[in-house]
Image (cartoon, rainbow, N blue to C red):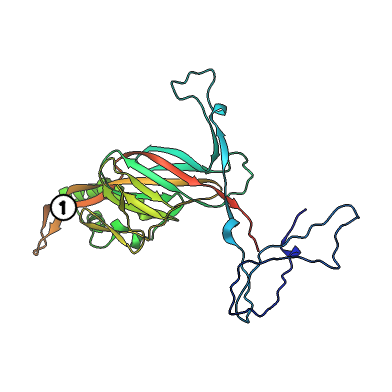
Amino acid sequence: MAINIDDWIRFHGTFEADPERKVSKVDFQVEAKDAVSSTNGVDRVPIYFTDIQFQAGNALSGWTPNTKEMLKRLSWNHDENKEAATPNRFEGYPPQVYQNVQKRWYNVLGRGHRVIVVPNYFPEDWDVPILPTGLDLTLYPKEDYDLLRVSTNAGVWLPEEEQWYKQEGGIYQEIKQKYEEVIRYGEGERRKIEINNWENIVKPLLDEHPLHRRYTREFFVDGNKAGSEIKIHATTRTATVNGQEVRIVGEDSINVNGTNFPIDRKKFLLAPKGTVAIRIEFYKQRERTITTYDQDSNGYYYPIDKTFKYLEDAGIGFHGTVSFYQWTYGRSYI
């Protein structure tokens, strides 16, 4: 028979305790009077009791649900025989049956900016309700890198005034202004060079730079060497690079080869029921030198070499794993 919260009744009473004596045991007995013990004279209706509490003082406190089973971790059996190709030969690693599996694992492999789709459904039954689940991501880059961003794949472009490479005083605004000037008044070699600087170099590199987008959840990691072990684990709310802790809060910029790149607070990633798309971005800082024209105090233009730095998707390869526990709605006790 089904029992819900409305079927329970709370009883309470008071008694005077002897301050000179200690409690060694408690005998409890239930006596029911004027109660329905059966529905038709045959089916017996049981009486349940739970949670006996002794409380000092003259004020009766309330109760709260026990959170022990509010969330329930799921487990399942995994039979590799169902997925093995037949006929086949296995050199020392035949298919196995794993009992009471609780953690899901997926291999991650990519190069450059990649979107990884992580399924989050109960393996034995798609219809089982699944709660949002924290993802544990472990990555190993195949080359040195200067910045890593891991994010969800849902985001928008920042307003132009907030885009890092379009700030006043930077190479983007400088070359854009020179381009607009030569379009109106320039001529000769200077006109050709400034048009080329803008249309073929600076604008393609920085106009729609991927770091000008912000995502619902994103996590930044400082640069390091090839083969570094990068762990961003939401289930324990910890992040490390080669075992060294990565700051989670209170950080608003990352130093990239002498340039402070601004970031939002780092946010761990979650997987809702169904699937979640994760964007993985490894960057290297590049240095580029272009010839442009400056103007002296007499109004004459002269060529000058200018160097600027920027972060670029250099196609860094990586591998790793993404894993997570699965949870569903449990129940609470009174």
Q: Nearer the viewer, residue 294 or 19?
A: 19
Above or below: residue 182 compared with residue 321: below
Q: Give the residue displayed 66% in from the left and 80% down from the top.
A: 16
Q: What residue did someone put label 1 on?
A: 306
* For residue 294, side relative to residue 152 (left or right): left
Say what secondary structure mark 1 lies in. strand
In the picture as drawn, the residue positioned furthest to the front comes out as: 20
Please provide percent x and percent y for residue 99.
Answer: 55, 37
In the rendered image, residue 82, in percent from the top left (x then y), is placed at: 57, 28
Viewer-nearest residue: 127 or 67: 67
Identify which residue, 268 or 239, lies in the foreground: 239
* Residue at the spot 56% in from the left edge and 52% down from the top edge: 131
**Left or right: 177 as drawn, with respect to 248:** left
The residue that appears at 44% across and 42% down in the rendered structure is: 116
Residue ranking furthest to the left: 298
Quarter of the figure that contains the C terminus? bottom right
Q: At which x and y percent is residue 107?
A: 43, 37
- Asked whether, in this view, residue 292 is left or right of residue 33, the answer is left
